[in-house]
Image (tube, rainbow, N blue to C red):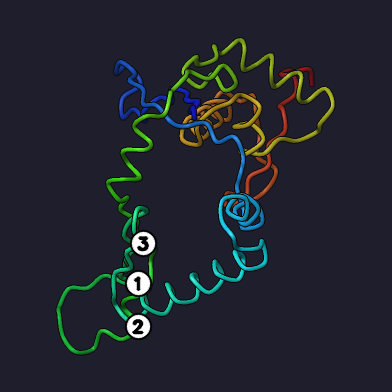
Amino acid sequence: MSLLYEFYRNPQSDENEKGTYHPRVITTGRVDTEQLARDIQQSCSLTRSDVKGMLAALADKMAQYLSEGKRVYLEDIGYFKVNLQCNQEVTEVDDKGVGKVSFKSISFRADERLKKALKRTKIYRSNLKPHSMPMTDEEIDAKLAEHFATNPVITRRQFQFLCQLLKPTACRIIKRLVEEGKLKNISSPQNPVYVPVEGYFGN
């Protein structure tokens, strides 16, 4: 077993502040019920269909017990419980709270056996996503020029992927390029689509 990771820059409140980084696991794929059923079938007497049926029944029962306010404990896996959220600001606690609170998420706390198994995992630095190696302004300009050579527009998501940036960093750089008059938003503020201003990025 082994994990790949890359360093990501932490958000900075001050551009002059020295940057710090945190590691994140690089996701290498997704395992679905079909894959789990095949794997479990090979290590027990259940058929693949039996395993898929059992997992479907498990999901239904977990939803039932969680909706009743219970914590669900799966031995050697961990604990599950429901988290709630306020839909509007609550300034006074009274009996008229209907509609103010809703489901938010399900939290998970790993069982000690599962955590011990993962502690034995070998961890390696990834060379696939160099987020910890920020691009210079010149490199970003070159990437945009290459993009606009074959594409008339670019979105924030496309820019983020193009330059391998985190969302906050991508938004900050795009804002700077707009303020410098290099990019222009031709759509709405809620769904911006950018084009190069004449004289920049090969336009």
Quadrant in the rendering for residue 84: bottom left
In the picture of the structure, the residue carrying the numbered disc 1 is 87
Front position in the image: 4 or 180: 4
- The reply to whether callout 2 and callout 1 are in contact (CB within 8 Å) is yes
Front position in the image: 46 or 183: 46
Number of other residues with Cα within 10 Å of mark 1, as a class: few under 14, some 14 to 19, many 20 or more? few
Instruction: State the residue lying farthest toward the left.
Output: 93
Picture coordinates of residue 108, whole percent (x, y): 34, 56
In the picture of the structure, the residue carrying the numbered disc 2 is 99
Q: CA distance from mark 2 to mark 1?
A: 7 Å
User: SS for tag 1?
Assistant: loop
User: SS for tag 2?
Assistant: loop
The disc placed on residue 74 is 3
Q: Residue at x 65, y 63 (%)?
A: 47
Q: CA distance from mark 3 to mark 2?
A: 32 Å
Residue 99 as seen in the image, left or right of residue 127: left
Q: Amino acid at mark 3?
A: Leu
Residue 177 as seen in the image, left or right of residue 47: left
- Vertical position of residue 68 compared to residue 180: above or below: below
Instruction: State the residue lying farthest toward the front.
Output: 45
Q: Residue at x 31, y 24 (%)?
A: 14
Q: Amino acid at mark 1?
A: Asn
Front position in the image: 171 or 71: 71
Indicate which disc, 1 or 3, sits on the residue closer to the N terminus.
3
Q: Residue at x 50, y 70 (%)?
A: 59
Disc 3 vs disc 2: which is toward the camera? 3
Q: Quadrant of the C terminus?
A: top right
Picture coordinates of residue 45, whole percent (x, y): 59, 60
- Vertical position of residue 79 compared to residue 99: above or below: above
